[in-house]
Amino acid sequence: MLNILVTGSNGQLGNEMRVLGAASADRYIYTDVAELDITDAEVVRAFVERENIDVIINCAAYTDVERAEDNEATAYKLNCDAVRNLAVAAAAVDGVLIHVSTDYVFSGDGHTPYTEEDATAPLGAYGRTKRAGEEVIEKSGCKYLIFRTAWLYSEYGRNFVKTMMKLTAERETLSVVFDQIGTPTYAADLAKAIFDIVEGRKYEGHNGVYHFTDEGVCSWYDFACEIAAETGNTECIITPCRTWEYPTKAVRPAYSLLDKSKYKRTFGATIPHWRNSLKRCITKIKLTEKI
């Protein structure tokens, strides 16, 4: 039996890990900031030793892309310093760290899906702090798997899907950017990918960075239209707009498709298409009314 620590367990991915872990014969320990301050190196080290942790799944992160521009030091503390603490603690007990990163480590000026070997060039504070977190893991000496993902949503917390469900129900018109291209990813799909690797002990000998999103490609405009269609909010007229028409502090990558070949080849896994996963998520949201 493994002892598995899941940090950031009140977030989108953490909540999905809770659902899956409930059916496991392994011992899952779920923490958020109230139970474990991962920015405190000594506290993390003592916790990992005391609980005999074998695997750490880090779902904690500073993910507010806009606020990160004004609070980079705070974002750095959670996205890098805390990650270093987890990596060092994992190395000390010969454990494994599974960490979640982002497509924002890339500049987005490419035109073919990014591979794990492509050069990183983050455009903003969020991407810089997440890339710094990757680097401290790689230098720590611990066993690790880093999963870069993108456009994450779920029935938990705040996210694009729930926002669009609400806005398309309330408004007659809505403008959504069409010149940012990527892949929506249901947090339950990423959680299942991580869960299967842990349950099957497939992490052994597979140190490295992996890309994971759902299959397919779309713009935020396409995504919003699909959400409206799935929820029956088709009376709301959604119009496409360019990024410059919706000014933000943070510069977002215009093209952030991630090549998932390495993940699929290494773990022999298949990945759902984003449209199918969106249907599953919206069905759950409707059943639980978590909008």
Image (spheres, helix red, strand yellow):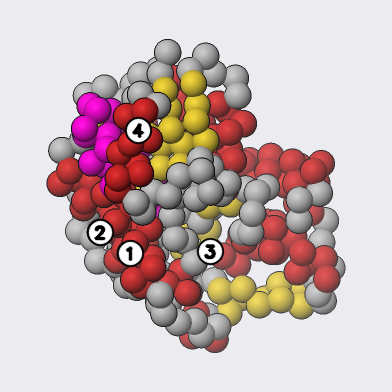
What span is colored magenta in the figure? 85-102
Mark 2 and 1 residues: CB-CB less than 8 Å, in contact? yes
Image coordinates of residue 268 in percent, x first then y, are: 37, 24
- In the picture, the quarter occupied by the N terminus is top left
Circles 4 and 2: CB distance less than 8 Å?
no
User: Can residue 215 be seen in this snapshot?
Assistant: no
Q: Residue at x 41, y 79 (%)?
A: 70
Whether residue 233 appears in magenta in the rendering, the answer is no
Q: Is residue 263 left or right of residue 136?
A: right
Residue 202 higher or lower than 12, as above or below: above
- Which one is earlier in the sequence, the residue at label 1 or at label 3? 1
- Sequence-wise first label, 3 or 2: 2
Binning the other alpha carbons within 10 Å of mark 3 as few (below 14), some (14 to 19) or many (20 upward) gives many
Q: Quadrant of residue 245?
A: bottom right
Q: Residues within 10 Å of mark 2 (few under 14, many from 20)?
A: some
Please report the residue visible at 24 percent of the width from the left and 28 percent of the height from the top. 93
Q: Position of residue 51 (x, y in %)?
A: 40, 26
Q: Which mark is residue 219?
A: 3
Q: Which residue is mark 4?
A: 48
Q: Place residue 163 in its image quadrant.
A: bottom right
In which quadrant of the rendered view does residue 143 lie? top left
The label nearer to you, 1 versus 3, is: 1
Name the residue carrying label 2: 132
What's the residue at 34%, 71% (across, down)?
73
- Give the x, y percent position of residue 18: 58, 33
> Residue 205's x, y, as percent?
22, 24
